[in-house]
Amino acid sequence: MLLSVSALSKHFGGVRAVDQVTWSIDVGETRCIIGPNGAGKSTFFQLLIGRLKADAGEIRLRDRVITSCHPFERARLGIAVKPQTLGVFAELSVEHNMILPLQRSVHGRELEAQLKTRLEALGLSAKRNFPARALSHGERQWLGLGMAMASSPSLLLLDEPTAGMSPAETEQTVSVIRQVASTGVSVIVVEHDMAFVRSLAVRTTVFHQGKVFADGSISEIERNDEVQRLYLGSHGAAKLRQ
Amino acid sequence: MRSLINGKIEPGRSVFFWFAFAAAAVVMAVLPFEIGRYTLLNFNSFLLMTFLAAGLSLLWGFGGVLSLGQSAFFGIGGYAYGIIVINLSSGGWSSLAGLIGGLLTATVVAAVLGWLVFYVRLRGVYVGIVTLVVTLVIETFLNQTAGPQWVVGSAHLGGNNGLGRFSGDIQQLSSLTIPWGAHDFTFMGSSKAFYYLLLGLMLVSYFCLRILVNSRFGIALTAIREDPDRAESIGYDVRLLQTVAFSIGALLAALSGILYVSWGNFITPSVFGVNANILPVIWVAVAGRKSIAASMVGAVVLQWGAQALAIQGQYALIIQGALLVLAVLLLPDGILSLGPGMSRLRLPSRRTTGSVALRR
């Protein structure tokens, strides 16, 4: 078990955004978390990365309790994040964006070598001195993802990684995530785009009213009558079958 | 080391820049021989403020933290220097003790204040408000220390009159003095020696800060300026880095304060006042807060301009205020952003990336 949460709760006033959630992910596993706005998946994501403090419950990374750890401590323990916003520093150069996660673990020539390799892999070598704001939307998404991977994490959290991407870029993202997972990194993907979730074809957790409502393969989720009737409604069901 | 001195964070990397830098250094080196003693006295008072401006540039331009109370550390450094020098009587060693004591006191106070401010995650305008309130509280407190009970050892705080020659006591506040063989060497405020001391310290401070902002610390600091939450999510302790930058800014402000006391042999609570705190913000904003060099040059040029205006009439502050408003409205990155070859980042040409690239 890489990461596990038990009885995790977060309330905002009277609203139970995350309510007694118990959930876990294995080493090398990729998991999708889906649900409409207000289902609690974003709050759950913020709790995992430490941006929000839990009211109750526990988060463990391997054997270590990290419930009260700050985001920077979680990052140092191997949790990398690609936020829903692009996750790049717009006014800094592409190079400096990439150096930021790299310089925490490597220095000197090793840093320069890794920088070169990683920028080449992202297709951004020619733009290394450009400010990140000068990149296209898709390029910034890739840079954000590249930055998350540059810290050599054991767990990668992706918040709507395909937001604003073209269908071709979305398809490319699927293969990138599979590639990352094949190196033994666990991946948690919070996503709205059902076509993308279907393409990824991994175990999927459905959130509803702050609780885990269903869990299983994407085909099981799509066949689940309860999910369709209680959770998605007729409109959502139609959308799910698209 | 070369990549740190000429790194990509601090602007001014071109041959043109270094040529202008060398030319300015030569002019500065011969300047005291071309101007009178009174002008030199004035010029020294402008130069000693460059450290305060450089510290503010680091904190605000690179770290994104606008402190409206940098003069608190200027004053704390100056007062601590004065109190130590008065208590240890005159002499090279007491002056050195005052220098070290002044720098340490301001830095420790900044570290504690920074810890309180940044560890409760105050951001933006709130940091400015807290720092301004702190400096105004110190000013108010010192203003009521005229009574004989307000002494630190043999140093009488002196209320409005402050420390030094205007306190009405016999206490002497000597200029910075170093032990020099059998005799001590004193850097009098109007002397060439004081001028060259300032020039040397400016060069050392500038290159140290240049190396610092181009280092791993500097890159992390600029990331925090852009997006503190994202910087934290890739493993940087934002609170710690901001506290360190705040303390370095305070150290430099204290150096200015100590040199100010050494220059004029007095210090009063007015150094903690609103004017004293806002003027450095104007120098740095107008010149270009994202460059250490521009901030230092701005401090000298705008002080000189203000004095020239003050001689003509009472419009200096109004014009400086108007400059700040214009800078904020028209040139958010200061006059620096107009300079040739001063852009920190190479913008792509239309040919390489199309129309997306140059849109802001």
Image: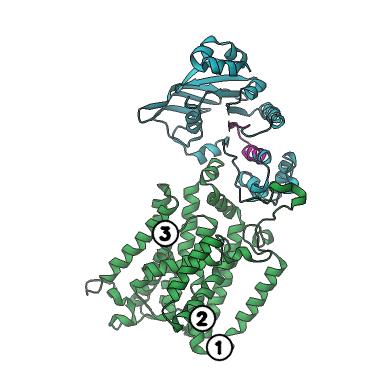
Chain colours: A cyan, B green
Q: Give the camera-side residue of A234 and B246.
A: A234
Which residue in the protein does label 2 denote? B43
- Residue stretch rendered in magenta on the structure: A141-162
User: In the orientation shown, which residue stands out farthest toward the front?
Assistant: A235
Q: Earlier in the sequence, mark 1 or mark 3?
A: 1
Question: Nearest the camera: B313 or B154?
Answer: B313
Percent position of residue A115, x then y: 70, 45
Residue B47 in the image: above or below residue A120: below
Residue bearing the label numbered 3: B110
Where residue B116 sits in the image (x, y, percent)? 38, 51
- Determine crowd level at label 2: few under 14, some 14-19, many 20+ residues with C-alpha closer than 10 A: some
Q: Quadrant of the N terminus of chain A?
A: top right
State how far apart marks 1 and 3 are (Cα).
38 Å
**Viewed as shown, does residue B163 lie left or right of A129?**
left
| Left or right placement of residue B257 versus residue B302 in this view | left
A151 over A28 or under it: above or below: below
- Classify mark 1: helix, strand or loop: loop
Residue sitting at x 59%, y 28% = A189
Are the residues tagged 2 and 1 within 8 Å (C-beta)? yes
Task: Say whether mark 1 and mark 2 are on the same chain.
Answer: yes
Vertical position of residue B27 compared to residue B101: above or below: below
Mark 1 = which residue? B35
Marks 1 & 3 on one chain? yes
Quadrant location, the C terminus of chain A: top right
Question: Residue drawn at (58%, 59%), measured in percent from left and top?
Answer: B212
| Label number found at residue A63 | none
**Residue A227 visible somewhere in the drawing:** yes
